[in-house]
């Protein structure tokens, strides 16, 4: 069934005619599970051609799930079978839940901004569709963080690879993530804005209202770092160890494509945050390798080679990205 997006508490449909209309303002279609339990937290999950059904099922089984709301935002995929699977999944969620289906793709930043606008609570938990909570206390820790908060803040739980077994063509991404992304809270708190990964963060909605995602970032990469740096400049950012597993490891060819084509986003980040960008090893490496002939294709080939040790492949991946980004940065 589909319902118009409306402000206020989530309610069950009132008639068959109402269930088939789209919102006149956005063209969005909505499916609700009919529950209207009070909640202080809304879990917001953006998705685009990626099933969130396993995540929805696992969230429903966690302690405290009946006290939270859930919004799934399909960012214009047009995938009817996937949306039917999501609609079926939210029927079993113990709290109030909605599936919102957009008619067009808004992109990574636009979808998150829209999700927050749809949330009806002061606190929002952003989770990517390919994440999975690492233990049964995942929601309980975030609910405790809300109870402890003295004002608007961002709480980042971090992520891991605890529940994933990388395929052969995902080993490079797994090795890169373990080295650069799967970091303990103690380390992330040393540069709180830099390590805000929007795949698993608890945020007070007033922060989103003050610091929305920059929708001029296009494609993949760096919009979350830009947003995290801007948030950290105005609000308290706290990292805790409340990890979720990143199930969506990329195969080698997709990872290399993302790293090789996101230089324009890195350039936008550097223009907005020159001091922070200059402190990044990636920026310094890009400046140093600028103009070195054949470095980019050679580093790419080494990173793609599954016969090399993971540490060599990760180093080659870093050189490949630095060489790709060097076209967008000035030599120091």
Image: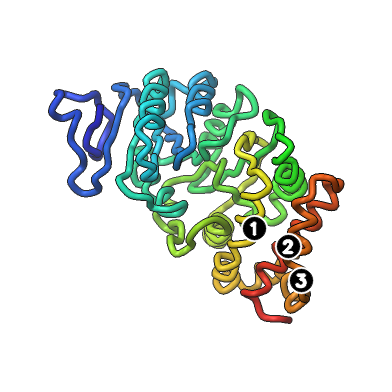
Residue at image mark 2: 320
Q: The C terminus appears in which quarter of the rendering? A: bottom right
Residue at image mark 1: 259
In percent of the image, x 52 and y 39: which residue is there?
Answer: 127
Q: Is residue 77 visible?
A: yes
SS under mark 3 = loop
In percent of the image, x 68 and y 73: which residue is there?
Answer: 326
Query: In front: 159, or 326?
Result: 326
In percent of the image, x 65 and y 72: which residue is there?
Answer: 275
Question: Would you say the residues marked 2 and 1 are in contact, meaning their CB atoms lie under 8 Å apart?
Answer: yes
* Image-based side of 176 in relation to 144, left or right: right
Find the distance from the CA under tag 3 to the CA under tag 2: 10 Å
Query: In front: 18, or 194?
Result: 18
Q: Nearer the viewer, mark 3 or mark 2?
A: 3
* Image-based side of 187 in relation to 222, left or right: right
* Crowd around label 3: few <14 · some 14–19 · many ≥20 (10 Å): few
The quadrant holding residue 315 is bottom right
Q: The N terminus appears in which quarter of the rendering? A: top left
Q: Is residue 46 visible?
A: no
Residue at image mark 3: 294
Residue 107: x and y, percent? 43, 53
């Amino acid at each position: 069934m589909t319902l118009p997006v409306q402000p206020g508490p989530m309610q069950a449909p009132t008639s068959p005619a109402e269930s088939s209309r789209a919102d006149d303002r956005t063209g969005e279609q909505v499916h609700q599970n009919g529950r209207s339990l009070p909640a202080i937290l809304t879990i917001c999950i953006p998705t685009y051609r990626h099933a969130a059904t396993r995540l929805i099922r696992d969230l429903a089984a966690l302690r405290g799930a009946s006290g939270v709301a859930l919004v799934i935002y399909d960012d214009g995929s047009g995938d009817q079978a996937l949306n039917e699977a999501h609609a079926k999944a939210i029927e079993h969620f113990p709290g109030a839940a909605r599936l919102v289906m957009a008619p067009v793709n808004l992109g990574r930043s636009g979808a998150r901004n829209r999700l927050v606008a749809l949330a009806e609570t002061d606190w929002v938990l952003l989770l990517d569709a390919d994440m999975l909570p690492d233990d049964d206390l995942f929601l309980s820790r975030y609910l405790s963080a809300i109870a402890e908060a003295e004002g608007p803040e961002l709480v980042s739980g971090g992520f891991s690879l605890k529940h994933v077994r990388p395929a052969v063509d995902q080993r490079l991404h797994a090795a890169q993530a373990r080295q650069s992304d799967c970091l303990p809270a103690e380390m992330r708190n040393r540069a709180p804005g830099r390590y805000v990964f929007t795949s698993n963060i608890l945020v007070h909605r007033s922060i989103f209202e003050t610091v929305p995602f920059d929708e001029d970032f296009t494609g993949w990469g760096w919009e979350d770092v830009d947003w995290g740096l801007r948030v950290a400049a105005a609000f308290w950012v706290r990292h805790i160890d409340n990890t979720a597993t990143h199930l969506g490891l990329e195969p080698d060819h997709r990872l290399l494509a993302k790293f090789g084509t996101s230089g324009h986003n890195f350039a936008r980040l550097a223009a907005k945050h020159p001091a922070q960008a200059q402190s990044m090893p990636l920026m310094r490496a890009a400046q140093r390798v600028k103009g070195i002939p054949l470095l980019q294709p050679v580093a790419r080939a080494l990173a793609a080679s599954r016969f090399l040790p993971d540490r060599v492949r990760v180093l080659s991946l870093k050189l490949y990205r630095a060489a790709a980004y060097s076209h967008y940065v000035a030599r120091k």
